[in-house]
Amino acid sequence: MGTWGRGILQDDLASDVYSEFMDAYNKGDECSAISSRLLIEYGASPNELDEDFVPFWLALAKALWECGALDEQTASVCRQIVRDSLGLEGWGELDAGDRLKRAATVSRFVESLSTPRVKPRARRRKMLRPPIYKVGDCLAIRDADGMYTASLVTGARFVNTTDGVNFLWALQYYSVEKPTLSVFTEAGLLWLTHGNWGGKLCGHWCFTMHHKRDAGAIECIGNVSRTQLPSLPEAYSDWLSNSQQARLQAVIGFIDPPKIESISWLKLVANKFL
């Protein structure tokens, strides 16, 4: 566990407890049930107050207070923390004033708990953003100069409970003409030799949440069936990055990587990208 500031939530333990509480609260769980689960999960006891659990109790109190559900037991533990100056060990090691400042921060916070929040925090439903495209979707991307590039979707997943991503491999294509489906089965992958790229394959994950700002430049023209797919690296960028790289590479010319359907392509992906 680590602490990076004097604030109530500027501590790994406190931050985790507060986040877990709010996640459950936003899902519709009752505050008392959440509190009970956290006590069991973290092994905290109001009857045996340990210095190491001070961040836990302060974070729990903050969450309960914000939701208009602060119970007397939790409030009492927080008052004891202030009364007995608990959780201040180590605060004066670097700066003698840090201990006093931390104590003042905690004292003000605990004092504020005695005044109920005027309007309890509303539950906030998380927005679900699933992946936009399916594996095999063929994206024609038009840049500001009216030139087209091509990217093949080879991955679709969630990176957490709400945010979807798609993986796009850039292809060797840069033309005034919109790419046809044959481009997505015949064109080679885009290898970058401009700048300092040194022959790396161009591909990355793109977040659904960032798609809206670039949607006007992207058109899915169809879907090609894939029989072999490479392992995808954990690289992230924006939706137009492939297009920008294709334009820069086109200036010095495309190199000749294997075709998408080539069996040896999978080995080259592993050797040249990772």
Image: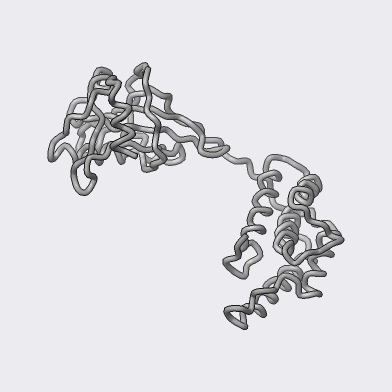
| Residue at figure coordinates x 19%, y 41% from the top left | 193
Count of picture labels: 0
Residue 140: name its quadrant.
Answer: top left
| Residue at figure coordinates x 67%, y 80% from the top left | 100
Would residue 13 be seen by someone viewing this image from the given angle?
A: yes
199 or 248, nearer to the observer = 199
Is 149 rendered above or below residue 111? Answer: above
Residue 66: name its quadrant.
Answer: bottom right
Q: Dividing the image into 4 quarters, which one contains the C terminus? A: top left
Would residue 118 be seen by someone viewing this image from the given angle?
A: no
| Residue at figure coordinates x 78%, y 44% from the top left | 30
Q: Residue furthest left?
A: 252
Q: Dividing the image into 4 quarters, which one contains the N terminus? A: bottom right
Q: Position of residue 248 (x, y in %)?
A: 19, 42
Is 87 rendered above or below residue 132? Answer: below
Q: Position of residue 120 (x, y in %)?
A: 73, 53
250 or 208, nearer to the observer = 250
| Residue at figure coordinates x 24%, y 33% from the top left | 190
